[in-house]
Image: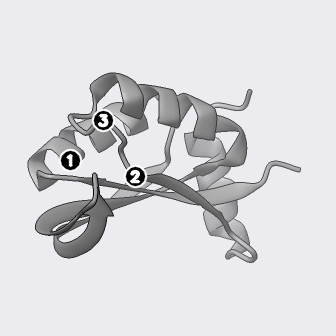
Amino acid sequence: MDELVDVTITAESADWLAAFTRELVTDRLAACGNIVPHIRSIYRWEDDVSDDSEALVTLHTRKSLVPRIIQRTNDRHSYDTPQVIAVPIVDVHPGYRAWVLDSTDAE
């Protein structure tokens, strides 16, 4: 049985994330993406603590597609080390599960 995951990715720009998400959905790597245009990220990077405005997308997809999403993110993202985190979905509405599976490529 195909496992579903949510994948989160952050970026400097909600517009960039929207275009990137559209590309992933068009290529059937994700069924959809929910974008939060303004989040505040506080993090340590290169021995400094940063406090920046970012955007966040949560993608709904198959676990088997995560490596392709990571590769695509590495190829297109402006960050040296982009946040790409996949979290397993432990339960889901059966109809929504079927829609995610129908909307994404099986590998």
Q: Amino acid at mark 1?
A: Ala
Q: Which residue is labeled 3 in the image?
A: 80
Q: Position of residue 30 (x, y in %)?
A: 49, 44
Q: Relative to residue 54, is residue 30 depicted above or below?
A: above
**Snapshot quadrant of residue 36:** bottom left
Q: Is residue 91 above or below residue 6?
A: below
Packing grade of label 1 (10 A; few <14, some 14-19, many >=20) is some
Whichever of labels 1 and 2 marks the residue nearer the N terminus, that label is 1
Query: Residue 77, image x and y in percent?
Result: 27, 34
Q: Is 54 displayed left or right of 26 in the figure?
A: left
- Under tag 3, what secondary structure? loop
Quarter of the image with the C terminus in it: top right
Q: Disc 1 or disc 2, which is closer to the eye?
A: 2
The tag earlier along the polypeptide, 1 or 3, is: 1
**Element under label 1?**
helix
The amino acid type, in three-letter code, at marker 3 is: Asp
Q: Position of residue 29 (x, y in %)?
A: 51, 35
Q: State the residue at coordinates (12%, 67%).
A: 52
Q: Which residue is mark 1?
A: 18
